Image (cartoon, rainbow, N blue to C red):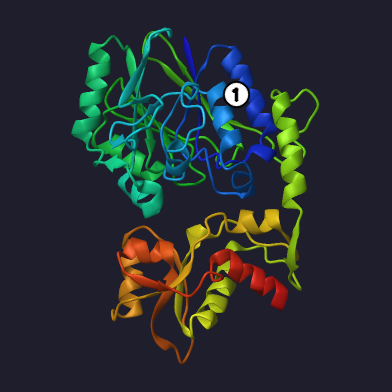
Amino acid sequence: MTTVIATNDFHSEVAAAGALLARLRAGKNENAILIDAGDFFGGNAFHEFSTGETEERLLAELYDALVPGNHDLEDLARLRDPAAFPPVVCANLLPPDGFAGAWHAGLLFRRTRPKLGVVGWLGEQAFEAASPGERRGYRFRRPTPELLRAERDRLLDAGADLVLGVSHTGFEADADFQRTHGVFDLILSGHCHSDNYHRVDQAGPAATRHVVKAPELGRGAARIELDGDGGITVEIERFPSGPGASGAPGHPFGWLVAAIDRFRSWSQTAVGSFADPTDSRETIAERIAEAASAAAGNRAFALNLGAIRTGLPARVTRGALLDCAPFDSPLVVCRTDEPVPGLLRQLEALGEAMVCARPPSATPGLATTGYVAARLGLAADPLGPSHTIRHTISAMCEAD
């Protein structure tokens, strides 16, 4: 029997994931194979505090393999201890020149019974969702069924009894891939946060195809049991989260408690305040777009909702600000005469959910963030060094 424990979309939730980390440590001690399906790094204030160093150490101590997510690319390119880092597995992406860690298209675990092969891939939309700076130096090709099937067959020829796919593409896309192509008996999925965690499709009288995703943001793991006869059992494990979980007595990583304490102290620096809390990230995104529109000379302003991850409390601290806007970007004015509706349609086709402020008597042109301008492939002029998403929120706090 081989046990695989999988996570995905952890997004640096170190300070609230003590229960999950304890489970992963126990699984490691039980000789389970630990795999992450991408986006272990980034997306909150802790990552801004640690700059990925803590997350890198956790991956090195716990995991046997990981597939890169779009939010991992920058951290993978700057590993502090590449020799200790687990193998990166991705068949359709090559790292920048000079990458000193281990990078494989597929990986065979000979110590397991049955012998397990793993093929990883990064979806096209996920790769393009990374900023140009984060993607710099990486070489991407589309993860076609032919490419993935060839890597699966290579691992089978090398002695694998069973080959799993590990995808950072999105649950529904992976389910469609399974139904259409059926390259793998099971795909571990990441990228698109959703309430879907396990889907099974019949692929014939005696065959099934699974797509499995763990609860995101440190709230759970997927446990997969593989027997020697091809049987697959899946359990979705959920764990409590909260600010006290990681500092509990007997925490499995004693070195981590001090780091979390330093983070909590660092994150409490006051930024400003609002008259009332704004619980909805959609609402705070609309307020940011309106304020940025005014700063951009009353132009229509388009903000990608993915840049905003949470609402904001009435008292805004550094931690709350960075949790809300973990991916800062400069405000810019695009150099284009194309009407705003057409640009928004282009962004929708690229998979971006947009929030747009359009003043009644708007100045011609579109203002947005540097990230969105790059997604559109448009040249743009920055508003100035003090005009970014985070600076806009800070100014809103002070003015409220």
Please determine whether, in this image, residue 166 is positioned above or below residue 83: below
Residue for badge 1: 24
Q: Position of residue 310 (x, y in %)?
A: 61, 57
Is 318 left, or right, of 100 in this rendering? right
The quadrant holding residue 261 is top right
129 or 258, nearer to the observer: 258
Using a 10 Å C-alpha cutoff, classify the residue at mark 1 as few (fewer than 14 neighbours), some (14 to 19) or many (20 or more): many
Local SS, label 1: helix
Q: Position of residue 64 (x, y in %)?
A: 47, 21
Pick the quarter of the image with the C terminus.
bottom right
Please determine whether, in this image, residue 382 is positioned above or below residue 259: below
Please determine whether, in this image, residue 125 is positioned above or below residue 141: below
* Residue lying at the far right of the rendered structure: 249
Q: Is residue 253 visible?
A: yes
Is 3 left, or right, of 130 in this rendering? right
Is 347 left, or right, of 237 in this rendering? left
Q: Residue at x 26, y 22 (%)?
A: 152
Three-letter amino acid code at disc 1? Leu
138 or 4, nearer to the observer: 138
